[in-house]
Image (cartoon, rainbow, N blue to C red):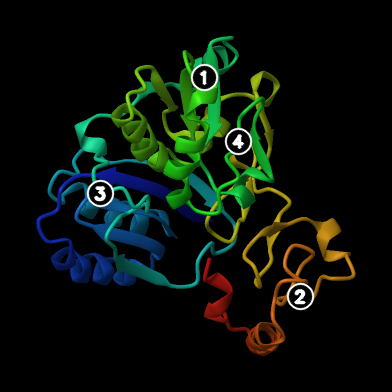
Amino acid sequence: MYRIAALYHFTRFSDSAALKPALLDLCLAQQVKGSLLLAQEGLNGTIAGPAAGVEAVLAHIRALPGCAGLEWKEATSDHAPFGRMKVRLKKEIVTMGQPDVDPLAGTGHYVEPEDWNDLIRSDDVVVIDTRNDYEVAIGTFENAIDPETASFRDFPAWWEDNKERFHNKRVAMFCTGGIRCEKSTNYLLGQGVEDVYHLKGGILRYLEEVPADQSSWQGDCFVFDNRVSVGHGLKEGPHDLCHGCRRPILPADKAHAQYEEGVTCPHCADSATEADKNRFRERQKQMTLARQRGETHLGKFEL
C-alpha cells in the first residue's frame, strides 16, 4: 500500500529556493513521489510512497522554518498515485494573483467537519465552492454556489460581480484541502465582509470524518493524483482522467463516440485541434508500448 499525504502550510521563507535541493534529494532517497510547490509564502502539495519514506519527508518539512505546526491529510492507495517526484519553485503556492492577500494576517473562522452541516443549513448563510468548474462538476455540498471559475485567479472578479447577492449574509467557503479558503477568506475580510467561515481541512477531512448517512456532500471529490476522485471514507471514486483535457470522466464518457483513449473525451473532442490530437495519440502510443514492456510512462502522471 502507498501512503498519501496532502499538505500545505503558510509561513514566510526567506529563501525558498535554498530549500529545494535537500527536500528533493530526500524524497528521491526515500522513494517518495508526487509534487511539492515552494514559494516565499510557504509550501503545498501531495506526496506518496512507503509509510516510512513519507514520514521522513514530513519530519523534514516540519523542521523547516515556521513549519512545526504542519498538518496534512492522509490516505492510502494500492497503486502508485504518482510516477515521479517534482519540487517546483512558484510565486504562490496556490495562485490567486492578489498580492495584498496574506493568510498569515488573518482568515475566516475555521469550522470543524462535525459542525459544518449545521452552519451551511442556516438560513442566513451562503455557501460558496471556491474550486474550479471541472472539480465542482463531479461533486459539491448541497445548495452550494458554483462560481463557474476556470481558475482560482478568476474568483476575485466573480466576487466583485456577485457580492451584492450576499448582502447581510454570513459566508461559508470550502475547497479540497483548505488551502484556497485560506486565501479566499482573507480576501473577503479585506473586502469588508465580517462573518466569513471555512471548512477546516477541506472536503477531504469532511469525507474522512463525517459518516455518509449524516453527510451533506453530494457526488465525489476531485483529487490531484491518479486516484482522480474520492468519496466518503476517502475511498477511490469511479472517475478516470481524460489525458487530453485533464477533466474527470466516468465509464459512460468512455463509451461515448467522441472518446478516444488518451486523446479526447466528450468534454474536449470539439475544442481540441488536430495538432493536439496527433500529439496526444503519439503520447498514448508511447504509454501503451511502455506498459507492454512492464514500464511506467511518466507522461501519464502529469496531473
Question: Tag 1: residue type?
Answer: Trp
Location of mark 2 (residue): 261
C-alpha span from label 4 to label 1:
17 Å
Mark 3 is surrounded, within 10 Å at the Cα level, by few (under 14), some (14 to 19) or many (20 or more) other residues, namely few
Q: Nearer the viewer, residue 95 or 302?
A: 95
Mark identifier at residue 116:
1
C-alpha span from label 2 to label 1:
39 Å
Q: Nearer the viewer, residue 101 or 12?
A: 101
C-alpha span from label 3 to label 2:
41 Å
Q: Nearer the viewer, residue 25 or 167?
A: 167
Location of mark 3 (residue): 99
Location of mark 4 (residue): 233
Mark 4 is surrounded, within 10 Å at the Cα level, by few (under 14), some (14 to 19) or many (20 or more) other residues, namely some
Circle 1 SS class: helix
C-alpha span from label 3 to label 4:
37 Å
Report if residue 14 is visible in the image: yes
Q: Nearer the viewer, mark 3 or mark 4?
A: 3
C-alpha span from label 2 to label 4:
29 Å
C-alpha span from label 1 to label 3:
30 Å
The residue under the point 47% across, 13% down is 168
Along the polypeptide, which appears first: circle 2 or circle 4?
Answer: 4
Kindly indicate the quadrant of the structure image that contains residue 216: top right
Along the polypeptide, which appears first: circle 2 or circle 1?
Answer: 1
Q: Nearer the viewer, mark 1 or mark 3?
A: 3
Mark 2 is surrounded, within 10 Å at the Cα level, by few (under 14), some (14 to 19) or many (20 or more) other residues, namely some
Along the polypeptide, which appears first: circle 1 or circle 3?
Answer: 3
The residue under the point 53% across, 44% down is 131
Along the polypeptide, which appears first: circle 3 or circle 2?
Answer: 3
